[in-house]
Image: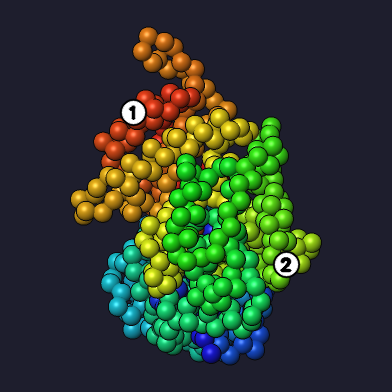
Amino acid sequence: MQQKIIILDFGSQTTQLIGRRVRELDTFCEILPYNKFPKDDPSVIGVILSGSPYSVHDPEAFKVDLSQFIGKIPVLGICYGAQYLSYSNGGKVEQTGTREYGRANLESIDLNNRLFAGFEKGSQVWMSHGDTITAIPEDYDIIASTGDVKYAAFASKTQPVWAVQFHPEVYHSLQGKQLLENFVVNICGSKQEWSAASFVESAVQEIREQVGNDRVILGLSGGVDSSVCAVLLNKAIGKNLTCIFVDHGMLRKNEFTKVMDAYKGLGLNVIGVDASEQFFKDLEGVSDPEQKRKIIGRDFVEVFNAEAKKITDAKWLAQGTIYPDRIESLSITGMVIKSHHNVGGLPEEMHLQLCEPLRWLFKDEVRRVGYELGMPERLIKRHPFPGPGLAVRILGDITRDKVRILQDADDIYIEKMHNYTMPDGSSLYDHVWQAGTVLLSTIRSVGVMGDERTYEHPVALRAVTSMDAMTADWAHLPYDFMADVSNEIIRKVKGVNRVCYDISSKPPSTIEWE
């Protein structure tokens, strides 16, 4: 039986970071809505209560029945989770009117408490809260304080319950991983058996049990997720897998041909379909980003369905859906962050059952599984690319000429990133989590080329560093590289006369512009 930590999500933007840090400890975890704790599940070895955008005093604040797990298994409350533990057990949480945000240092730490084993006095942590805990329940002790926050951490005297007002999951909390390891491994007793190798072994067995000798169809995108999914399925069911790669016309330059060649080199049975005419026709005049996503998702299903019907004995559709896709598509607050055309089930007319073997993995875990499967680096290291392709990197409506402009500019950017050598001998591409070019087709800027005045489009270059795409910072690209890329794009790409660089982080921005 696989051990797991349950993370109850109260709506924090960093909840997935908690999950990511737990996975880094080779421990499986599952993120669930605050009110969906799995009762009577013996595989659960601990519970983490996440932060939240709400105050515990808000009428709409999320509340959970703590008796489901308090006193039964170890519990760690983070930020709102800590405030809720205090508030629910007789402590006080007050609205001070000032937000405590940013770096702080633990000036007082109980190093004898198991949660802070291995900590250094003055350890830096990250605060982000509006309310302040002004009193803790009677049976709790203070175990850490900062200069401004008396109850930075506290623990029950009688039960395995800990709470921290700061965020150990973010990198600004320098010993945050140590704290989570103390909780997950030393307190909850994780055996740390979750790994890429163990995942491949269990996933192959699960796939075989799920689909038996049935034929499975997989929609490929050319990205890491669907590629790893294809190789994993191929390992499990071999010739019973048929892959379909739909070209909607908004892939990167020459990508359809390159990817088809790569897939055939892996021994996969792949059918390539050029459906660009249909996609361009249906996208004509559409500028709204969400509408573009929905049209592409709908058309993809239609094209895929038409091709799938030719495989008369198919009973399953496999998808490369990963964990962040499932969680980001609908938060517990009911607010859609973005829609994914590979999430949300299948149209009934397809009459196919769904197989999602990567549904529990974060992006970097998918890559580790790819290495475990022996896939070539050129596929595993590919940057994430949106399912709707360049359609959501073109601000405004979509035309073939705009796609051509963006393909040419992006091709120069990415190719130069591959060819730029960093001091450690690796390529700049490998130092970046995700890079891409955005065409600001709704804007025209004045330029001068030769003796002529131009009135053409700007493009924005985007490059971010990240661990899991839940948060991201803009990549500090070398100036000589950016100067070279800008010069090359303006010189060679007709329709572009200005190159900008996006220096926004996530949050508050997203990685993609649409």
Query: Earlier along the polypeptide chain: callout 1 or callout 2?
Result: 2
At label 2, which amino acid type do we have? Answer: Thr
Left or right position of 334 against 252 = right
Task: Provide the residue designation for mark 1.
Answer: 487
Assign the C terminus to one quadrant of the image. Answer: top right
Marks 1 and 2, Cα distance to the nearest angstrom? 52 Å
Crowd rating for badge 2 (residues with CA inside 10 Å; few <14, some 14–19, many 20+)? few
- Residue 347 occupies which quadrant of the picture? bottom right
Q: Nearer the viewer, residue 257 or 304?
A: 257
Left or right position of 453 against 239 = left
Crowd rating for badge 1 (residues with CA inside 10 Å; few <14, some 14–19, many 20+)? few
Query: How far across and how far down the image is residue 2, in percent?
Result: 52, 86
Secondary structure category for the residue under label 1: helix
Query: How far across and how far down the image is residue 89, in percent?
Result: 60, 78
Using the rendered image of the protein, determine whether residue 188 is visible from the camera's viewpoint: yes
Pointers 1 and 2 in contact (C-beta within 8 Å): no
- Tell us which disc is closer to us: 1 or 2: 2
Q: Nearer the viewer, residue 316 or 128?
A: 316
Task: Provide the residue designation for mark 2.
Answer: 312
Using the rendered image of the protein, determine whether residue 126 is visible from the camera's viewpoint: no
Residue at image point 58% right, 33% down: 400
Secondary structure category for the residue under label 2: loop
At label 1, which amino acid type do we have? Answer: Asn
Query: How far across and how far down the image is residue 435, in percent?
Result: 42, 46
Left or right position of 395 against 58 = left
Q: Nearer the viewer, residue 211 or 68?
A: 211
Which numbered dot is residue 475? none
Residue at image point 48% right, 82% down: 201
